Image (cartoon, coloured by chain):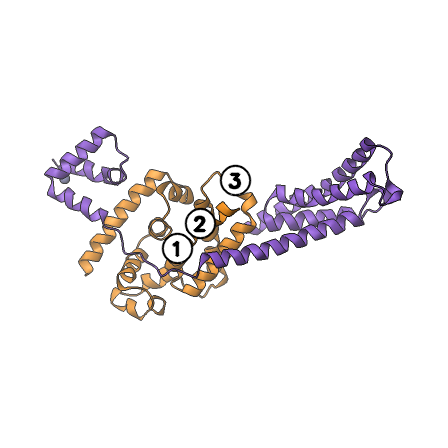
Chain colours: A purple, B orange
Amino acid sequence: MKTNCAVTQDLLPLYEEELLQPDTQRFVEEHLQSCQECWKIAEQSQIPLPSKVNPGSSPKKMIRKITVKLTTIQIFFVAIAFVLAMSTTVMNDNRDFILTYTILGVAVYLFYRSVLVAILLAAVPNFIWNCLLYMTDIFRDYYADSFFEALGMALINLATHLLFTVIGIAIGFCIRKIMEE
Amino acid sequence: MKKLEEEYEEIQPKIYAFFYAKTGNSATAQDLCHDTFYEACKNIASFNGHSTLSTWMFSIATNLLKKHYRKNKYQLSLMQKLSLVPETEIHSLEELAEIKEDTRKLLYHISKLEDSEREIVLLRIYGELSFAEIGALIGKSENYARVTFHRLKLRIQKTMEVSL
Ligand SMILES: [Zn+2]
């Protein structure tokens, strides 16, 4: 009978969570009926440990506060990205974007730890701005003749800027790995 | 986004209880809890769904706790303190002032476990994680977590009864 005791006790964790096959479950139940010692252990393990902890402050309030803070930071990032997009166009031979978009990539990636978010934050304002620039006649100097020419220019512009954002993300990734060491 | 907030609200008391059991200080637990949710909200885009949201949040929580103790080197964790004093003196620990008697005893016995065992017990009873989630967090199988917890629980109950 001793082997049955050891087997039953080993099976108890699975028995309590009803994870046993029907046959095995029957075996355990039959043994528990006939063995006082194992019955006691099974009963004992039903009793939860006293683990109550006073609840902390309301989670709703805390999460709301964090959301507000993060939304503010996000708006700030988007604003910066728009300013960068407006101040750099390849057309007027401005090379500052090499530095600014790399930094943007590093900063946004390190903050959100997401490649997608970093790329979107750099790309969307840049693309919107370039479309305004080449497709509308608000800024007459750059107005392109056809839609496809405009789209082409906007995309080329986007690609060059994104290249440096991606380099920034790569740098950010390395920084993160080094910091985690 | 709404769904995520609901899940956060559900996990929050568990994260808080886990930090509380680890630090024995409600203000510290509160702060660490806040930091965990801040990190989680900020980096949610990097949550890849390979694990459950709880597992992911608890791995953030564990990392923040490690950082917290690294920053405050002089500060012993509650578990370290508990493991140093005899049971009769656990009342004198200021960290335990607001904790109920039976929970105090339980924490004392948990502090006597080995590091890896202790983690399983704390994650289960305070973090209320499933065995699969605990397994994923400690890098072991679900069944390892289940069986180990079961044994430790019986052992703790036995010693607690003896010491009553
Ligand atoms: Zn038996």
Residue named by callout 2:
B58
User: Which element carries disc 2, helix, strand or loop?
Assistant: helix
Q: Chain of mark 1?
A: B
Residue A27: x and y in percent read: 17, 32
> What is the residue that sits farthest to the top in this orientation?
A23
Residue under mark 2: which chain is it in?
B
Q: CA distance from mark 3 to mark 1?
A: 24 Å
User: Label 1 amino acid?
Assistant: Phe
Label placed on residue B48? 3
The vertical placement of A127 against B60, above or below, is above
Chain hosting mark 3: B
Q: Residue at x 27, y 53 (%)?
A: A49
| Most foreground residue, A143 or B128 | A143
Q: Relative to residue A170, is residue B119 drawn left or right?
A: left
The first of marks 3 and 1 along the sequence is 1
Looking at the image, which residue is at 21% across and 33% down? A25
Q: Position of residue B71 (x, y in %)?
A: 50, 61
Question: Between B84 and B128, which is closer to the camera in this rendering?
Answer: B128
Is the C-beta separation of discs 2 and 1 under 8 Å? yes
Badge 2 density bin: few <14, some 14–19, many ≥20, Cα 10 Å: many
Distance (Cα) linking label 2 and label 1: 9 Å
Say whether mark 1 is within 8 Å of ligand 1.
no
**Sequence-wise first label, 2 or 1:** 1
What residue is shown at x 73% (from left), y 47% (from top)? A101
* Label annotation for residue B156: none
Amino acid carrying mark 2 in the image: Phe
Q: Mark 1, residues whose alpha carbon is within 10 Å: few (<14), some, or many (≥20)?
A: many
